[in-house]
Amino acid sequence: DIQMTQSPSSLSAFVGDRVTITCHASRDIGDRLNWYQHQPGKAPRLLIYDASRLQMGVPSRFSAAGSGTDFTFTITYLQPEDVATYYCHQYHTLPPVFGGGTKVEIK
Amino acid sequence: EVVLMESGGGLEQPGGSLTLSCVASGFSFRDYAMGWVRQAPGKGLEWVATITGLGDAPYYAEFAKRRFTIYRDNSRNKVYLQMKGLRVDDTATYYCAKDRGYNWNFFDNWGQGAQVTVSS
């Protein structure tokens, strides 16, 4: 199975800060990666698909990049409503695998 | 608007069985694969199973093979997850999710989740 290593596991930042999360795949997955936001008690929400494409309706302060084995996810201007756990997810090869998650909090 | 609503969760003893249901609306159900993802307490997301639009090809995580069965009823816009031989470590919130295409790919819409607790 492909392993997805996500870092950091948690972070705390100020409102308005730029936040970056990284995800490393154990082998080349091309652009078959997406990013989800999961808030407690809510359904997970797709933010980014195909490594860098913004899902319809998602604010433009969310962005992502990368291909192959190394990927990044960025929130350019952190908002209070962005408090959540963020997961990368590979869909290049079965089984699809999620990263371990990054819990984002506000200082 | 895509809406997915799970039901059938609850408390079950180890070794028991439970079937989760998910009713979908807001899209052409038979044209999309559907699946289940779970989250154990304090843990991350874990894929469980996916089934293609017409139900002709199910895919399972290794832990789900031989114990779980995913199936669908396109006449009712429903997908199911039958779970047998439940173990304590199957305790989790189980999310129903819609795939972006006919075959397995990634999930673009999710339900609110159904809680499954396995305990004696």
Image (tube, coloured by chain):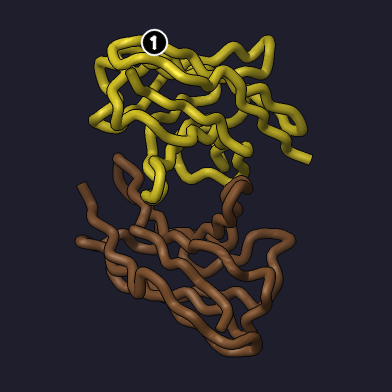
Left or right: where does residue A106 sit relative to residue B93?
A: right
**How many badges with numbers are in the image?**
1
In the rendered image, residue A46, in percent from the top left (x then y), is placed at 58, 55
Position above or below: B107 against B14 = below
Give the letter of the yellow chain: B
Which chain is assigned brown?
A: A
Identify the residue shown where x is 53% and y is 22%.
B9
Q: Residue furthest front?
A: B120
Say left or right for B17 vs B101: left
Regarding mark 1 in the picture, which secondary structure is present there? loop
Q: Nearer the viewer, residue B92 or B35?
A: B92
Picture layout, residue B58 above or below residue B113: above
- Residue A67 shows in this picture: no
Q: Residue at x 28, y 12 (%)?
A: B15
Quadrant in which the C terminus of chain A appears: bottom right
Disc 1 target residue: B17
Residue A99 in the image: state x and y as whole percent. Answer: 35, 58
Quarter assignment of residue A22? bottom left
Mark 1 closeness class: few <14, some 14–19, many ≥20 residues within 10 Å: some
On what subunit does the disc labeled 1 rest? B
In the depicted structure, whether residue B14 falls above or below residue B94: above
Q: What amino acid is at disc 1?
A: Ser
Q: Position of residue A35 (x, y in %)?
A: 49, 61
**Residue drawn at the location 50% of the way across and 74% of the way down:** A64
Look at the image and tell me whether residue B2 can be seen.
Answer: yes
